[in-house]
Image (tube, rainbow, N blue to C red):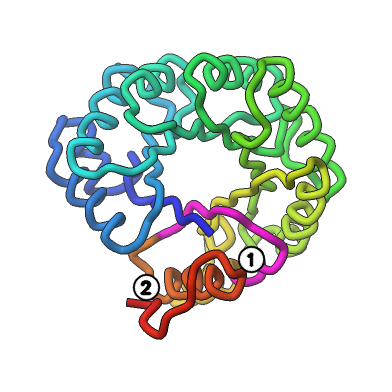
Amino acid sequence: MLIIGEKINVMSMTIGPAMKNRNPKPIQDMAMTQVGAGANILDINIGPARKNGPEVMEWVVKTVQEAVNVTLCLDTTNAEAMEAGLKVCKKQPIINSASGEPNRLETMMSLAAKYEACVIGLTMTETGIPRDANERIAIAVDIMAKMAEKGVPMEDLYLDPLILPIAVAQEQAQEAIEAIKMFRQLNDPPLKTVVGLSNISNGVPVETKPLLDRTYLAMLATVGLDAAIADPLDKELMDVAKTVNILRNEVLYCHSYLD
């Protein structure tokens, strides 16, 4: 299972000002800390970036790449900013994300084809959040059709079932699990899947957040989840992910695998 570090985010009280002021140190420190903790990929979330979006994304990508040598997952709704970041990525990047909304799907899949990027396909549309796994499947099929139209390989797609906070949509936790099961049946070999893990614990008491995240990750792993955008600084969460890799025979077992 891949862990995509979530901590380079414009909403952070340290990272946001660093982006605004073009201060590389907090961003590079966080990049190195996450990779040191075991993150395989780093998410770079600059938000809508309505002001100077392309320049911000280009600067952040270059700043991170000066510090670490990992795949980057670029997260913004600003298509021009997304393209600016894709242009300067040294490794195959991931676009986070294309949804089933027609205009956004067209734009992001065109960028994926142009820059040979992987894509996170978020199974929601302009009409809102899916009610169940079946609605998520219908959106996933539309995303796959657009990929085929643009010539983006299916192996470059990560389907996201859209995790909702358990505090407001408890039944949706199980619907997302069912969706992942169904996603894997849409293609041979099975399509890859990803979730924004910490969404499950948004709005809950702070003392219960880590336990919810860790337990849900283990549940998702049982149905074949491939990647999670998560907090790699939560050591117990990372221990769960490492143990999943052992039990799924994805890495060679050794007695010191948690080190």
Picture quarter with the C terminus? bottom left
- Residue extending furthest bottom? 255
- Badge 1 element: helix
Q: Are marks 2 and 1 in contact (CB under 8 Å)?
A: no
Residue 209 shows in the view: no
In the rendered image, the vertical position of residue 195 relative to residue 67, given as above or below: below
Q: In which quarter of the image is residue 109?
A: top right
Residue drawn at point x = 54 percent, y = 51 percent: 196
Specify few, some or many for label 2: CA neighbours under 10 Å numbering under 14, 14-19, or 20 or more.
few
Please tell me which of labels 2 and 1 falls first in the chain.
Answer: 1
Front-lying residue, 192 or 162: 192
| Residue identified by numbered label 1 | 221
Question: Identity of the amino acid at label 2?
Answer: Lys
64 left or right of 220 in image: left
User: What percent of the width, then of the height, locates residue 92?
Assistant: 43, 31
Image height of 208 relative to 129, above or below: below
Residue hosting label 2: 235
Give the residue type at disc 1.
Ala
Q: Is 76 part of what is drawn in magenta?
A: no
Residue at screen point 48% across, 77% down: 253
In the rendered view, does 112 fall on the left or right side of 138? left
Kindly identify the residue that appears in the image at 40 percent across and 47 percent down: 41
Magenta stretch in the rendered image: 218-231
Residue 35 point in image, percent of width and height: 30, 55
Does residue 227 belong to the magenta stretch? yes
The residues tagged by marks 2 and 1 sit, at their Cα atoms, a distance apart of 17 Å
Secondary structure under tag 2 reads helix
Q: In this view, does 142 lie to the left or right of 101?
A: right
Residue closer to the observer: 189 or 222? 189
Which of these two is toward me, 1 or 74?
1
Query: Total marks drawn?
Result: 2
